Amino acid sequence: MSVDFEKLKELASLFAPYAPLYAVGGAVRDELLGCSGGDVDICSPLTVDEVKRALEGSFYTVSDRNLRMGTVHIFSDEFCAEYTTFRTDSYDRSSGAHTPTNVRFTTDIVEDARRRDFKCNAVYKDIMTGEIVDPLGGVDDIKHRVLSAADTPDNVFEADGLRVLRLVRFACELGFDIESDTMRAAKQNAWRVKDIAVERIHEELNKIFISDCNYKGDSLPKTPYSDESVEWCKGSRVGEKPHLRGIKLLDELGLIDLLLPELAELKNLQQPKKYHLYDAYWHSIKAFEVSPPHLRWAALLHDVGKRRAFDMNLGANMHGHDEIGADMVREILTRLRFANAQKARIVSLVRWHMVDIKGDMSWHKLRRFAAEHSDIADDLCTIKDVDACATFGYLPAQNRLRDAWNELKSDGTPLSIKQLKVDGNDLIAMGVDEKQIGVILNELWIDTVLNPELNNRNGAMKYVLRKISE
């Protein structure tokens, strides 16, 4: 739950006789950047037992969350905040595990600051007085828009492999540069990400992929998926979109090879120069760049099957990469613990992104395809647009699938059997055998998609009567 500083002052007044209560981390950093909102993490030297005694008899309740880490939730009515006692952590340096092996509580704010990831996230604000406490020079990093490690860079990344992904995310969301030694250590320790829970990796990748939506830099690059967004094709792009920077940083750190090796297979896979500006890998990156946020996984992986199709076809072509890619994407997203519904949707977009690629599908077939895939039609039209943009360097004037889809919507064509003007009860009343109801309704739906004049009750009833008499 989002908490502002004013609401925290009452809580801080209860801490005041014992110790100052501080806000720390992203909320303080963002406030110094001139941004507002977001969750507030609070901390002090008080142990959990001392916090419970300080709040005894008040309206606040302390709910145990992770006592080993000194973390609890403090809440009252609609108020809730996460509290952590000052501590130092130690980790198993042979892995990148996110959870400390040993925790020691401390009263030293400098020790607490050094166990954090980056200096810009180790700035504290005394909630009662508003004083900024800056043990490590994080304010200067925020001022100069730079990410540097809170401790020695090697210690920071050796302690927790997730911090490599967080480094990329913060660089993209904040528009910060990465200090050179911090980048070096991140690259050397990127392998530790393999020891992070897959769910954590998935979460961080998602945030990186939509980092432009949470961008806190001085100015946001051009909106994705617009006519202006293809200017990179013309060599006149200004700035770099945060999510594009994110994918490039992941690649520079070796994380594409580690986390998405199927995508890495596309590197240096050349495509016919007659149609393509880029090799298969950079074509995928460019499609990702111009895609709207909710389609970036599909855009990034839409051609993931090209290397294997190329090998299967003995280098002659990449035919069948859409089917091969769909199977690969299903495996990738299963590995990354995607929800089944989201996984199925992305797989379908990859499977069908080549439909009518030559623009020679009959109009009736195209209408039927759009109707049969109405659940993904809007997104599939967009995927075809960004694919074309990343192929030719511009957005083609026509997308035939979009034209067919728009026509279906404008002429009121039923997009499913349920939208027909007749139903099973009507057919029963007309004497249709129950075993034939589903067959006749399906045939009626297909014919209505191809012949919109059937999309009225009178026309539909006549159609059924003809079927009965056959």
Image (cartoon, rainbow, N blue to C red):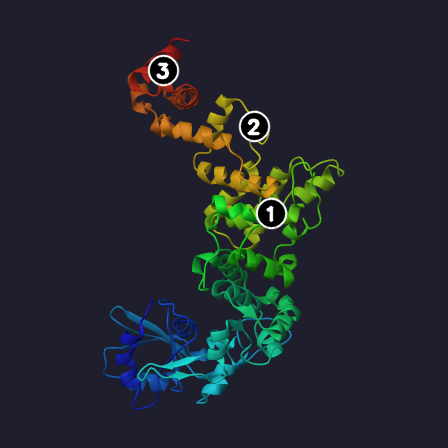
* Amino acid type of the residue that numbered disc 2 sits on in the rendered structure: Gly
Q: Is residue 308 above or below residue 218?
A: above
Q: Which quarter of the rendering shows the N terminus?
A: bottom left
When the figure is inspected, residue 443 is found, relative to residue 121, above or below; the finding is: above
Pointer 3: residues within 10 angstroms few (<14), some, or many (20+)?
Answer: many
Q: Left of 88 or right of it: where is 392?
A: right
- Binning the other alpha carbons within 10 Å of mark 2 as few (below 14), some (14 to 19) or many (20 upward) gives few
Mark 1, mark 3: which one is toward the viewer? 1
Report the front residue among 468 and 170: 170
Residue closest to the far top: 469
**SS class, disc 2:** loop
Which amino acid type corresponds to the residue marked 3 in the rendered image? Val
Residue 331 visible in the picture: no
Q: Residue at x 26, y 80 (%)?
A: 10
Mark earlier in primary sequence (2, 1): 1
Give the quadrant of residue 257: bottom right
The residue tagged 3 is 464
Q: Residues within 10 Å of mark 1 (few under 14, many from 20)?
A: many
Q: Is residue 363 left or right of residue 261?
A: left
Q: Secondary structure at mark 1?
A: helix
- The amino acid marked with disc number 1 is Ser
The quarter holding residue 196 reads bottom right
Q: Earlier in the sequence, mark 1 or mark 3?
A: 1
Alpha carbons under labels 1 and 3: distance apart:
48 Å
Q: Is residue 125 left or right of residue 254?
A: left
Badge number at residue 284: 1
Q: CA distance from mark 2 to mark 1?
A: 22 Å
User: Is residue 387 something that shows in the picture?
Assistant: yes
Residue 149 point in image, percent of width and height: 56, 76
Q: Tell me the residue at 47%/85% (across/down).
A: 135
In the image, which disc is placed on residue 359? 2
